[in-house]
Amino acid sequence: MTNHAGSAASTPKVSLRGITKSFGSNTVLHNLSLDVATGEVVSLIGPSGSGKTTLLRCVNLLEHIDDGAVLLDGDEISAIGRDPNPVRRRVGIVFQSFNLFPHMSVIRNITLSLTKVLGQSHDDANAHASGLLRRFGLSEKADVYPDQLSGGQQQRVAIIRALAMRPEVLLLDEITSALDPELVGEVLDVVRELKGSGITLLIATHEMGFAREISDRVCFLHSGSVAEIGSPLQMFDSPSDERTRQFLRRVMP
Amino acid sequence: MARGLHRRTGHQPRLTQRQQHERQQRRRSSLIAATSTLVVLVAVLVLVPRMPRWDRVKQSFFDVDQMGDSFPRLIDAFWLDVKIFAWTTPAIFALALLIALARNSRSPALFPIRALAAAYTDVMRGVPVILWIYLVGFGVPGLGIARPFNSPLLWGSVALAMTYSGYVAEVFRAGIDSVHESQRAAARSLGLSSTQTMRHVVLPQAIRRVVPPLLNDLVSLQKDVALVSLIGPIEILRQAGIDKSKFANFTPFVVAALIFLSVTIPLTRLTDYLWQRERRRTSGTRVAA
């Protein structure tokens, strides 16, 4: 049932091999396997509780898996006792609830990890952050505090904050779910711009139209495993799994 | 925030019936408040002097000559209170922060430190301040430590700092716990270590939130500094006691109380102001009536 499509030629950027994760007696991910190629955009869709968020959090080691392995460029990052910090520099995440640091200005939100983790000088970090803010039309918000921004602006800053670390993989965890409908567009525009830049994107989303448009492959999760995976065309127009069909009927009437 | 601003600037705009009504309501509330205050004040001023022994009380508690005589000595002695306060405060904050961080450590290897920190706060908050000042202030110098490290003043204030750090540590801990886990997740996901996360992301937010309760503890500390006098140092409370015995008059105590108030009231007002500001910021729009 699980279909490992994609680039067989080279090592996958991210490889999940039979991962299992439980919280107490609740098994959230069940022997789940998924390979994502370098530069590929993969969307995770599925009902609430199907394990999308947990899957993403396992990739950047915010959660420890119970069994299986997570590989980054063929290197087992989920190995016991491994320092998660170097991995997290390479794998960024953007959260549903933005999670900007409220006591820091926008630019400081972005430069904190550049100076403290990458050891950049304040000048270098500021220049880099300013450049990104300019690129995404947020220059005039550099010295503003998060509370003074709209939800859409906050989420764009959160994306920039993750991008500033120049991650190889970016995990987007339902980044538009907490936004007013008219603000969704500006955030998705930022993601559109990232596609094709070489960054690998793993996107948990409820925006079916967006998933269809941006994804190289769409992955339907059900009860913690991959029920079906394929091209957007195949997934949305002729899904083969009954559960995928049912889910899509419910969310796309 | 901009509420009411437009009304004051420029010309008087016409008020709607609703606004007129609300303005009337506000005036009525102020009038009631002013009247009730006045009634209480007059009652006190009229009734107290009519008490049968008022003359005696006035003589022994409010003797104006005695006030003038004691005041310079008391102010001098108060200087010692200020000094004790000034050096215990940073010690308390540093110690309390250390204990709060120890209690918040998550590493299993640090369990003994966590347990020790928990025991410390339990003991410090469980023993009356005076008792602790006696025990440490007399006990430690009794070990025969060389001068100047055997002064009861030093160890008395150490005892005070120990007790207060127990309370303040709990305030810090509450602040740290109040920072949402998602803030830690965001910081860690950017590659910050747990120490960096605590220092740059969690603590700054935690401390900001607990400034009002911390100031509250400072107000309280200012008064409790006087307790150190019980083991010898002549600070204001003790000086007032000496004056009382010498002149057989309680007025020095009243003067001492006024001196304390002249410092604690401004600090209390500041605490209140910061409290209100924090409340306004975090609790959203107030409901109308």
Image (cartoon, coloured by chain):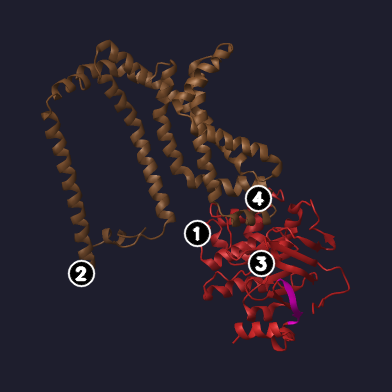
Query: Could you say whether the residue bearing mark 4 is in a helix, strand or loop?
Result: helix
- CA gap, disc 3 to disc 2? 54 Å
Q: Which mark is residue B17?
A: 2
Dot placed on the residue nearer the N-terminal end, 4 or 3: 3
Can you see residue A216?
no
Please state which amino acid type lies under the numbered disc 1: Asp
Tag 1 near tag 2, CB within 8 Å? no
| In front of the other: B57 or A160 | B57
- Look at mark 3 in the image and give the residue it sits on: A53
Q: CA distance from mark 1 to mark 4?
A: 25 Å
Q: Residues within 10 Å of mark 1 (few under 14, many from 20)?
A: few
Q: Chain of mark 3?
A: A
Q: Chain of mark 4?
A: A
Compute the Cα span from label 2 to label 4: 58 Å
Q: CA distance from mark 1 to mark 2?
A: 35 Å
Residue B57 position within the rendered picture, expressed as x and y whole percent measured from the top left:
18, 22
Q: Is residue B245 left or right of residue A74?
A: left
Residue lying at the far front of the rendered structure: A25
Do tag 3 and tag 2 residues touch (Cβ < 8 Å)? no
Q: Amino acid at mark 3?
A: Thr
Marks 1 and 3, Cα distance to the nearest angstrom?
A: 25 Å
